[in-house]
Image (spheres, rainbow, N blue to C red):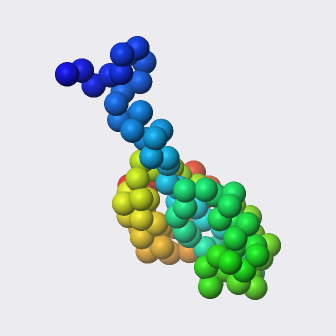
Amino acid sequence: MANYNVSGLETLAELARMKKGEWFVYILKCSDNTYYTGITKNITRRIIEHGTNKGAKYTRQRGPFKLVYKASFLNRSLASKEEYKIKSLSLQDKIKLIKSDTVIS
């Protein structure tokens, strides 16, 4: 069986991704010049949650926030692995990542 739908325009993997939705890894710059890294399926909703103290404990009382980095992944597992890698970086390496706008995987 071919790895394409009937029209041949999209691979089955692409179709599966569209159905499941993307996961995002994001970095917020907090008002105290610290960085918060997280994952979500909906960045807009998640930033609002952080801003209304319904997000992570770390971000409470650190708003307003600026989204400085985001990367999309096919599933939660891949996003979680990337989040872990980013959280393991030094501050200087996080800043380099933000400026380069690339994925470390």
Please tell me whether residue 77 is drawn above or below residue 12 in the rendered image.
Answer: below
* 71 lies left or right of 58: left
Image point 42% across, 18% down: which residue? 9
Point out the image quarter for the C terminus.
bottom left
Res. 70 visible in picture = yes
Q: Residue furthest top?
A: 7
Between 42 and 37, the one lying in front of the other is 42
Q: Residue furthest left?
A: 1
- Residue 95 at what x, y percent from top left? 60, 65
Res. 97 visible in picture = no
* 68 lies left or right of 10: right
Q: How many marks?
A: 0
- Residue 104 at what x, y percent from top left? 43, 56
- Residue 65 at what x, y percent from top left? 75, 69
- Res 41 quadrant in image: bottom right
Point out the image quarter for the N terminus.
top left
Between 38 and 22, the one lying in front of the other is 22
Image point 42% across, 65% down: which residue? 80
Please tell me whether residue 27 is drawn above or below residue 73 in the rendered image.
Answer: below
- Residue 24 at what x, y percent from top left? 53, 55
* 30 lies left or right of 6: right
- Res 15 quadrant in image: top left
Please tell me whether residue 101 is drawn above or below residue 28 in the rendered image.
Answer: above
- Res 48 quadrant in image: bottom right
Image point 47% across, 38% down: which residue? 18
Image point 36% across, 16% down: which residue? 6
